[in-house]
Image (spheres, rainbow, N blue to C red):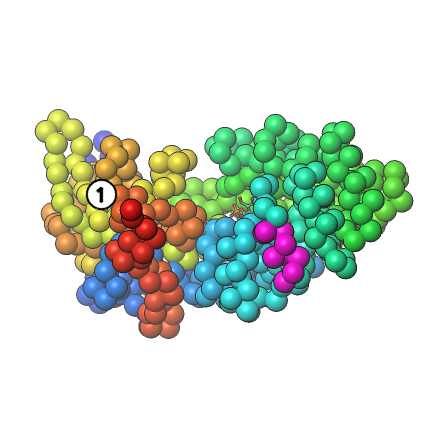
């Protein structure tokens, strides 16, 4: 017999569920009226003022995450991976907190520049950079470009007038055993060159033949949602050995090693996460050991966290449209958003929790499936979530941990405009990105 069976009142009244600080922004609370507040602003008020669905972003959470990285890696170059959420305000906050910025397209570069990020603090990635993207990156003077193919070496040597720092992306052959869509450290995948391969050797030799390209180091990115820091230690050992090989073969010293991002965050209570202190210790130990073994001078380490900076700062608000109990089946709570504002469930099978935000979720509960409003049977946002049994259309639901790869992956499927992003801080809310309107969508459609 479970505790709930012995004491049903534990479920049907009294205390509201805890808002676990592992997945909610650090200043999330219930107010006296039983509503959830973040940064001193009630989520129900945000839903009323800005409509739904809406992405809420806690500025303090983003800044505190940056500070935690700076404290754990005082010597490293820390690039915020903009692909997680690239908007001007976030570019501002992270650079104010001392981070640099990683971009992977001319669009992300334009946002970073519009936010006033110094070009020298920007690194450009991408396995399919166009001539135009490389040209603009060189012209504005980005600090580094990570070369991903032989074709890029040719393009860059034609484009660079003076001198450009570059890195070479290698895949160190490390399988982090994640979802196949996000495992990028293995040899047989589209990014970079396999470490130790003839192709990698050829790329190094070609870059070194170009006097205007300054090869400063190697780059790798192992994948996403990695919680075991040992993978990074192994990557460092393999990459330093390769760097020593370049010194021996070409008498050229690589001074920088970029080990990418991919640090795991919890999406639901109890999920694992990367521990930054452990990661920093493993990075140090691996560097010491690898450099001593090869007699190689310690390179400057760069890291590129994206998700770990912004995921937990974001909460998506939805309004309930309907509640449907299927005889002998599930209870479907349909909301006004779905796979267009959160494609991660359909893409990766990601799992989320959902809570009612406009009142204390006390009283009897039901087990529900939260369904999106889009015309796909697979448009399901969360399964097996506990919601009040008397949940009604019009109530506000909040889904935590939606700050990373939500806005940036969002679409306008079914011609539904993308949600706004509303920042909260010290009791004040402000719109950072406005809702995409019908006229935004129509303005691109030229017609006959
Ligand atoms: C090269 C590179 N760096 C950094 C990141 C950021 O990864 P995460 O947001 O998981 O930290 C990615 C993500 O795909 C990436 O491809």
Q: Is residue 273 above or below residue 137?
A: above
Label 1: element kind: loop
Residue 221 seen in the current view: yes
Could you tell me if residue 353 is visible in this image? no
Is residue 274 shown above or below 359?
above
Q: Is residue 5 above or below residue 254?
A: above
Q: Which residue carries the number 1 mark? A: 373
In the rendered structure, which segment of residues is drawn in magenta?
Answer: 132-140
Give the quadrant of the N terminus: top left
Q: Position of residue 83 (x, y in %)?
A: 50, 50
User: Of 359 and 5, which appears nearest the observer?
Assistant: 359
> In this view, which residue lies farthest toward the front?
448
Q: Identify the residue shown where x is 51% and y is 66%.
A: 114
Q: Where is residue 30, by image quadrant? A: bottom left
Is residue 344 left or right of 134 when viewed as pictured?
left
Q: Residues within 10 Å of mark 1 (few under 14, many from 20)?
A: many
Q: Position of residue 170 (x, y in %)?
A: 68, 38
| Vertical comparison of 427 with 12: above or below | below
Q: Nearer the viewer, residue 288 or 202?
A: 202
């Amino acid at each position: 017999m479970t505790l709930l069976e012995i004491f049903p009142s534990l479920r049907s009244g009294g205390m509201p569920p805890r808002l676990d600080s592992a997945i909610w922004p650090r200043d999330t609370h219930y107010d006296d009226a039983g509503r959830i507040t973040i940064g001193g602003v009630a989520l129900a008020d945000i839903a009323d003022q800005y409509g739904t669905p809406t992405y809420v972003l806690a500025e303090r959470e983003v800044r505190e995450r940056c500070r935690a990285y700076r404290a754990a890696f005082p010597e490293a170059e820390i690039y915020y991976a903009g692909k997680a959420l690239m908007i001007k305000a976030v570019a501002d906050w992270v650079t104010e907190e001392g981070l640099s910025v990683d971009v992977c397209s001319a669009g992300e570069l334009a946002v970073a520049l519009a936010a006033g990020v110094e070009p020298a603090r920007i690194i450009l990635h991408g396995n399919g950079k166009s001539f135009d993207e490389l040209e603009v990156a060189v012209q504005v003077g980005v600090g580094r470009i990570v070369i991903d193919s032989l074709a890029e070496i040719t393009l860059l040597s034609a484009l660079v007038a003076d001198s450009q720092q570059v890195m070479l992306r290698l895949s160190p052959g490390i399988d982090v055993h994640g979802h196949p869509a996000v495992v990028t450290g293995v040899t047989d995948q589209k990014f970079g060159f396999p470490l130790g391969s003839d192709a990698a050797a050829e790329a190094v030799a070609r870059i070194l033949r170009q006097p205007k390209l300054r090869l400063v180091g190697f780059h790798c990115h192992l994948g996403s949602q990695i919680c075991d820091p040992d993978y990074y230690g192994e990557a460092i050992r393999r990459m330093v050995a390769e760097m020593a090989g370049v010194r021996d073969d070409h008498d050229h010293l690589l001074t920088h090693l970029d080990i990418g991002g991919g640090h795991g965050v919890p999406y639901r209570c109890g999920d694992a996460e990367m521990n930054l202190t452990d990661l920093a210790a493993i990075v140090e130990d691996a560097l010491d050991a690898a450099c001593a073994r090869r007699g190689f001078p310690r390179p400057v380490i760069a890291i590129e966290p994206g998700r770990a900076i912004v995921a937990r700062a974001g909460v998506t608000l939805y309004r309930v449209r309907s509640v449907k109990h299927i005889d002998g089946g599930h209870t479907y709570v349909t909301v006004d958003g779905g796979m267009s504002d959160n494609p991660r469930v359909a893409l990766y099978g990601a799992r989320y929790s959902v809570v009612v935000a406009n009142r204390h979720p006390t009283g009897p509960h039901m087990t529900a499936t939260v369904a999106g409003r889009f015309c796909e049977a697979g448009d399901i946002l969360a399964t097996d979530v506990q919601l009040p049994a008397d949940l009604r259309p019009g109530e506000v639901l909040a889904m935590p941990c939606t700050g990373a790869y939500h806005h940036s992956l969002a679409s306008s499927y079914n011609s539904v405009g993308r949600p706004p992003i509303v920042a909260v801080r010290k009791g004040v809310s402000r719109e950072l990105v406005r809702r995409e309107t019908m006229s935004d969508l129509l303005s691109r459609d030229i017609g006959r």
